[in-house]
Image (tube, rainbow, N blue to C red):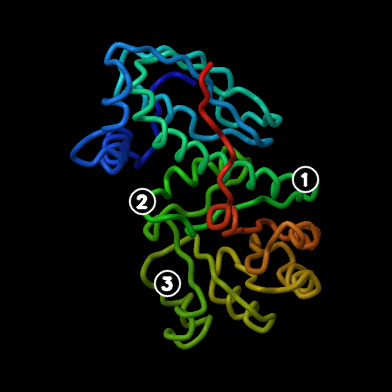
Amino acid sequence: MTEPFALAGFDLDAFIQSTLAEDLGTGGDRTSAAVIPADAQLHAVMASRDEVVVAGLPLALAFIRALDPDAHFEVVAHDGDHLPAGSALLRISANARALLTAERSALNTVQHLTGIATLTRAYVDAIHGTGAILLDTRKTLPGLRVLEKYATRMGGATNHRMRLDDGVMIKDNHIAVAGGVEAAVRAAKAAGLHDIVVEVDSLDQIPPALAAGADRLLLDNMGPPMLREAVALIAGRVPTEASGGVNLNTIRAIAETGVTYISVGRITQSAPAADIGLDFA
């Protein structure tokens, strides 16, 4: 993928410039300027030392091009590729000062996003064949939501709502303030809202939520036995989403209860960075 990287709601140029500015400060890369000749060229390879699902590689190109517009790339892998440890992702020929200056910003971004995509794929693989769909959440680093949710897509997840204004989700605190599940849903309906997701944490909240017109039920912190009861009680009238307490050890059993979706905050909140390096070639 060597074409310009475009994501809705994401300003690539602003991200590249602000990230480089954070790293360069006011004095620039003093080390490279002192020890590397201005016209020196560097040939390097970006490679993963882990088994990974790649995400963010076009951003690495953008960081390097921002400092050396004439840099040459051989793109070996693409976002979404599942690669064994030791795989090359990108071969680069660029001005040495520019490449060394851009290195940390490029690697930090690719390591972080690849880590998310890799962990996401592990969750997707864990529920393969059950029919359940993995969702991400809004548990993302401030300012990086668009990129992190892009990475979960590269890992095979489906994006949940991006922002508070592109979905309606009535959660436990809304319910407590509104005076109950039914009152909260009816208030949302009266406000002209639709596609209303309602969080319930007990079976007795399900009938009033459905009666009030909930369009989807988020079954929060229910173990597999209760999830099975909830799915049977709902009987296909609305889609269901399991959430809370989901990890790689529990997700298969949760998926096998028959829920439509499983949302997992860990895939963005707790993903370790992938071990990816840039080495002299």
- The residue that label 2 is drawn on is 143
Residue 64 higher or lower than 185, as above or below: above
Where in the figure is residue 133, as x and y percent of width and height? 67, 50
- Tell me if mark 3 has few (under 14), some (14-19) or many (20+) residues whose alpha carbon lies within 10 angstroms of its own: some
252 left or right of 195 in image: right
11 left or right of 111 in image: left
Numbered circle sitting on residue 188: 3
Numbered circle sitting on residue 225: none
Quadrant hosting residue 49: top right
Q: Looking at the image, which residue is at 63% across and 47% down?
A: 120
> Sequence order check: which comes first, mark 3 or mark 1?
1
Q: Secondary structure at mark 1?
A: loop
- Front one among 73 and 228: 73
121 left or right of 159 in image: right
Numbered circle sitting on residue 128: 1
Where in the figure is residue 77, as x and y percent of width and height? 58, 22
Q: Secondary structure at mark 2?
A: loop
Q: Looking at the image, which residue is at 28% across and 43% down?
A: 22
Residue type highlighted by circle 3: Ala
- Front one among 263 and 209: 263
Residue type highlighted by circle 2: Gly
Q: Nearer the viewer, mark 3 or mark 1?
A: 1
- Tell me if mark 1 has few (under 14), some (14-19) or many (20+) residues whose alpha carbon lies within 10 angstroms of its own: few
Q: CA distance from mark 1 to mark 2?
A: 31 Å
Q: Nearer the viewer, mark 2 or mark 3?
A: 2
Q: Secondary structure at mark 3?
A: helix
